[in-house]
Image (spheres, rainbow, N blue to C red):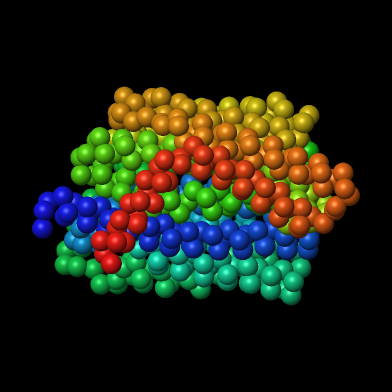
Amino acid sequence: MPESSHSDERARGNLKRLGTQIGNYGVGILIPAILSLLSSALFTRMFPTDEYGNYAIVLSLATFFTSLVGQWIQQPLGRWLAAATSSEREPLFRATWLAFGFIAFGLFVLGGLAQCLITIPHAFRPYYWVTVCYIWLQILFTTSALIFQASLRAASYALYQVTFAVLRLALSFVFCSVLFHSPVGLMWGTVVATLCVVPIMLFKTGMLRAILNPGRNASQPIWSTFRRMSQYGLPMLGWFAAANVLSTSDRLVIAAYRGNAEAGVYTANYNLVSGTVGLVTAPVLAALWPFLMTSWNRGSRRETGRWLGTIVSLMVAAGVLLCGAIWAIAKEAAVILLGPAFREGAGVLPIVVGGVVLSTVGTYTHKPFEFCGRTYVMMWLALITAASNVVLNLLFVPRWGYMAAAWSTLACYALYALLTAILSQRLLRWHVSMSPIVTASLASASGVSSANIVSDCLHWTGFGVPLIQLFIKASVFTMSVTIVLTTVYRRKLVTYWYQVRAARSSTG
């Protein structure tokens, strides 16, 4: 068989595998996101804004500590596991277990000391120990999910993400409605759901085998591997601390200056759309990430730069389309999915989507620093943007509330992505393709304009069924975007159609 036929066959095989990976990740992200929307619709109707605001503050702090502590070991694990051989995996796993032990010991010792030395407000006392358990179990869960992803086991990743999401929603409803009658049931539901799936995930990833059946002289590589992972991961503590300050400080400032009720409104709307970004971007990113890491591990800088530029370009283009879609249907979505007291915050939805998209973009624009082990540069840039966000929130939130918080966070995410994109060019040459971004902007503007015209017509006729309004506006937006994209990329679509047709004819 000619060499060109071999290469074409390999390319088709790679595309097929990539498509399968994207499909599996899509299932693993789509269903949990839908269940998250259902959770917001359900629990914002069960609890008043102040109680939900207390839960929002606890969840923000728990998320902060989960990311801060867990990423110390998850970053080097994901970095090296994608290219590790079978003999190299077990030392990584054993070093990860050593880190788990340190984390568990520190969490429960510090938790006990804090309970003895600090006076906890009455409203937050029921959350205390369940939050400590939540942090440690979520670290186990996210680490196991990372191993599936780095090992290109997308089907397993999807299975456990969906199982966890279903159990979390069902158990949270039972705990909230039967046992606690307060949002603390949401934390307990998450903890128990995690306990149900984590042991199986640890077994399937090989983590349990690595610790229960260690090889001969296993103590020798575990410490050296642990030191190597720590040297890489410890600077990431500063990065993740700054990243979580950037993502959660707005809610804490809102609660301090505007009250827990307004923090609850903002958090409910934030949670409503933050998962939606993953519906569009996360399946593709999760499938492409191992290829990006593998190309760097092979030493192919040109291929790595090409992958990185493609990912960032497509991410920004998809984010522009998603912001437009949310802008078009924000009011109707809030009416349908949130309780009456939470709907007033619908104006932040497209801004939050933009911030989440830019946050994800930033995790790729800083990849060259991560590849070269210069995580301290990432840390300092993240600290600069986090400090900027706190300052902007303190300046503007007391007067303008959560709208100012949303815009401040968006601006700081954009600052981080821009700084890392510019400075990383010294380590790896890559560039953003403006063509898909400009096309997506034109398509999004066309869709929003068309949806607004239809909205005015519906309002003028007195047609007021929110679900049907949302469906009509979403359909008009989709049709307008499709027309623009089809017009711009018509030649590529025709070429692709002929290629598919020729391939089917040759195989038939």
Residue 211, quarter of picture: bottom left
- Count of numbered circles on the image: 0
**Whole-percent x and y of residue 71?**
43, 48
User: Which quadrant would residue 153 be assigned to in this image?
Assistant: bottom left
Q: Position of residue 183 (x, y in %)?
A: 71, 61
Confirm whether residue 36 shows in the render.
Answer: yes
> Which residue is found at the position 29% from the left and 39% from the top?
304
Residue drawn at the location 19% of the way across and 51% of the way down: 7
Q: Is residue 313 above or below residue 103?
A: above
In front: 169, or 71? 169
Tell which of 397 and 106 is nearer to you.
397
Residue 103 sits above or below residue 419 on the image:
below
The quadrant of the rendering that contains the C terminus is bottom left
Relative side of 55 to 88, left or right: right
Image quadrant where one finds the N terminus: bottom left
Q: In screen coordinates, is 478 left or right of 77?
A: right
Can I make out residue 77 in this image? no
The percent coordinates of residue 301 (x first, y second) are 24, 35
Left of 153 or right of it: where is 279? right
Going 33% across and 59% down the picture, which residue do you hit? 16
Percent position (x, y) of residue 502? 30, 56
304 displayed left or right of 397: left
| Residue 193 placement: quadrant | bottom right
